Image (tube, rainbow, N blue to C red):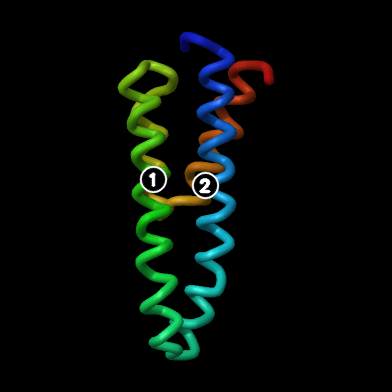
Amino acid sequence: MNDRDGTLRRLRLITVVAVLDFLLLVPLVAAALTHAEGTVSILGPIHGAGFLVLLALCVRGSVEGRWGWWYPAIVVVTLGPPGSLYGEWRIRRQLGA
């Protein structure tokens, strides 16, 4: 990994986006389970945009050599916030931060 401070800044941004996306995911799932179609039609695209931002941030870090391609892969597999938060924790541990 290169540029430790830049990596930590990128990880902070990923954490903020992941937490916000997770906070939207909870009511989205609740709305889907209660068949609140209006709420789903609003929150669904917002969550989708958050997922794409998380994925883009993780891919960019991989391209820059800040972390491996496992990070974007785990974001895809876990559908966003859980994988991005796990990856952030793992990379911080490796950096000793």
Q: Is residue 12 left or right of residue 96?
A: left
Placement of 57 over or under 54, stated as above or below = above
- The residue under the point 40% across, 34% down is 58
Q: Are marks 2 and 1 in contact (CB under 8 Å)?
A: yes
Say which element carries label 2.
helix
Alpha-carbon neighbours of circle 2 within 10 Å: few (<14), some, or many (≥20)? many
> Which image quarter: residue 38?
bottom left
Of residues 28 and 94, the one drawn nearer to the viewer in this rendering: 28
Placement of 59 over or under 42, stated as above or below = above
Of residues 93 and 30, the one drawn nearer to the viewer in this rendering: 30
Residue 63, percent from left and from top = 31, 22
- Residue furthest out toward the right: 97
- The residue under the point 53% across, 48% down is 18
Q: CA distance from mark 2 to mark 1?
A: 8 Å
Q: Amino acid at mark 1?
A: Val
- The residue under the point 35% across, 18% down is 64
- Residue furthest out toward the top: 2
- The residue under the point 43% across, 90% down is 35
Alpha-carbon neighbours of circle 1 within 10 Å: few (<14), some, or many (≥20)? some
The quadrant of the image that shows the C terminus is: top right
- Residue furthest out toward the left: 63
Of residues 47 and 94, the one drawn nearer to the viewer in this rendering: 47
Q: Amino acid at mark 2?
A: Val
Say which element carries label 1.
helix
Residue 17 is labelled as 2
Placement of 52 over or under 22, stated as above or below = above
Residue 10, percent from left and from top = 51, 28
Residue 53 is labelled as 1
